[in-house]
Image (cartoon, rainbow, N blue to C red):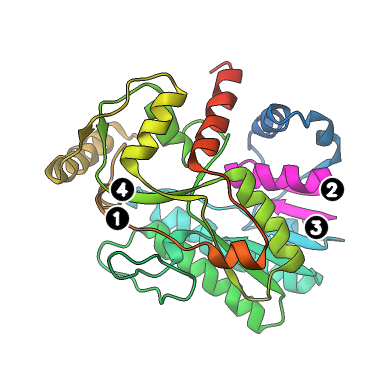
Amino acid sequence: MDLVTGATGIVGAHVLLECARKGPVRAIHRAHGDRSIVERIFRHYGDEGQLSRVQWQQADVEDVDALSDAMLGIRYVYHAAAIVSFDPRDATAMHRVNVRGTARVVNTALAQGVERLCHVSSTAAIGAAAAGLLRNEELPWAATKRTSAYAMSKYAAELEVQRGIAEGLDAVIVNPCVVLGPGIPGRSSMTLVERLRKGTKWYPPGSNAVVDARDVAACMVRSIERGGSGERYLLVGENIRYQALFGLMAQAFEQPIPDRAIRPWMLQLGWRLEKVRSTLLGSVPLLTAATAHSALIERGYDASKARKELAFDFRSAKDAVENVARFLREQAY
């Protein structure tokens, strides 16, 4: 049997479905976690019959005893549990879950003799490239004053996996870019999707990369089965400018195409005002210094290693956006 951590997240729910299609799979959940999203995602793909193959077990990545119980008899571990946030106030929580939690998953996998672990990292842990060049798995990572707490936590988590490999764990790492797929409202990329679903006239001037959640899950399974031990795999469906991505979302949600570029000064002023507003109201900021910077820069990623070694063809950004739009049309919210 295989084990999935973070099974209610966008990536976790999709890899859970991939595993369930093959046979019984165990998924851990926190005491008050909402598992209904998994049922909705399985139903969206016409796979609700596979829900009976999911064995839920209560555990937290910080609870060594519960993790040990969850990994009894487990062959492969897909570690997708993480906090994704660019709010500086979440730095402590991200270190606790993303770094310390990964260390405990690694230690438990070693203790229980797990055959192989697939760790979900991020392009945030990939080093920078010179202007105009695609970033790849071999670039050295270095923190700067603009590096987000999220990026630092994902890089530190990778170091825990590498430490486990040095101690005898067989593991692979995947580094997806922005993952688009059905998920819980207000979490990860669903936050952006829901905002654009309401329509906007504006688009950021930068560029990024997106990947379909279905492709991330499929590549995780392939990396477990055929990936090289200790290797990292960038998972990228399409490098795309925000203008084009926002346009695809506008079309999918039958909204006017955004036609006004956000100016750098607007983003700089915006995150500062948002910091004051969210602090006063105790709410989640809609814009932070990290996301403002991300919206301005241009970068792209090279997924040729994953395409070659995992023998995988990625879906387009359009396919990913349309899949999310179909899911949202099916929901009551």
Q: Earlier in the sequence, mark 4 or mark 1?
A: 4
Of marks 2 and 1, which one's residue comes earlier in the chain?
A: 2
Q: Identify which residue is drawn at 57% across, 32% down.
A: 323
| Inter-mark Cα distance, 3 to 2 | 23 Å
Amino acid type at image mark 3: Asp
Q: Which residues are magenta?
A: 1-29
Is residue 120 placed above or below 288 in the rendered structure?
below
Residue drawn at (39%, 65%), measured in percent from left and top? Answer: 134
How far is disc 3 from disc 4 in space, using C-alphas?
39 Å
Between disc 2 and disc 4, whose residue precedes?
Answer: 2
Mark 4 vs mark 1: in front: 1
Which residue corresponds to mark 3? 69
Q: Amino acid at mark 4?
A: Thr
Between 111 and 114, the residue placed more toward the observer is 114
Residue 6 in sight in this render: no
Residue 17 higher or lower than 156, as above or below: above
* Residue type indicated by callout 2: Lys
Dot label at residue 298? 1
Alpha carbon of mark 4 to alpha carbon of mark 1: how far?
A: 13 Å
